[in-house]
Image: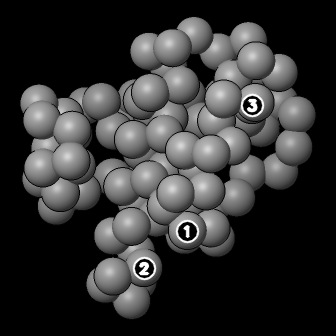
């Protein structure tokens, strides 16, 4: 799913300064990098903390830099968290 202003507002509470553009970039990076090895999962398919736990291993396999990994995790964590609390 596309991140929204609501997602950005929530994310900025956890990670001050997070903007919608960063969440959108994280989504694009997730699609581009992660789909080259396996099917993509909806962020809400897993609890938010799962994404933080799996990223260190996945970023090495996919040769993703720290900043890109950060943006991907913020997108996945935020959308997963918001979907699980809003029933979407």
Image point (24%, 57%), residue name:
7
Q: How many marks?
A: 3
Image point (61%, 56%), residue name:
50
Q: Which residue is mark 1?
A: 47
Question: Mark 2: few, some, or many residues within 10 Å (few <14, many ≥20)?
Answer: some
Image point (73%, 51%), residue name:
40
Cα–Cα gap, marks 1 and 3? 17 Å
Badge 2 element: helix
Evaluate if marks 3 and 2 touch, with contact meaning CB atoms under 8 Å apart: no
Left or right, 37 with reference to 51: right
In this view, the mark in front (2 or 1): 1
Badge 3 element: helix
Q: Residue furthest bottom?
A: 87
Q: Can you tell which mark lies on residue 84?
A: 2
Whole-percent x, y for residue 54 in the image:
69, 43
Whole-percent x, y for residue 24 in the image:
36, 37
Whole-percent x, y for residue 1 in the image:
47, 59
Cα–Cα gap, marks 3 and 2? 23 Å
Whether residue 3 is visible to the viewer of this picture, yes or no, is yes
The image quadrant where one finds the C terminus is bottom left
Cα–Cα gap, marks 2 and 1? 8 Å
Badge 1 element: loop
Q: Is residue 27 above or below residue 43?
A: above
Left or right, 49 with reference to 19: right
Image point (36%, 55%), residue name:
78
């Amino acid at each position: 799913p596309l991140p929204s202003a609501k997602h950005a507002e929530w994310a900025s509470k956890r990670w001050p300064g997070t903007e919608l553009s960063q969440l959108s970039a994280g989504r694009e990076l997730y699609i581009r990098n992660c789909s080259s090895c396996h099917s993509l999962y909806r962020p809400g398919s897993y609890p938010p903390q799962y994404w933080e736990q799996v990223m260190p291993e996945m970023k090495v396999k996919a040769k993703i830099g720290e900043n890109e990994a950060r943006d991907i995790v913020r997108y996945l964590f935020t959308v997963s968290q918001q979907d699980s609390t809003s029933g979407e």
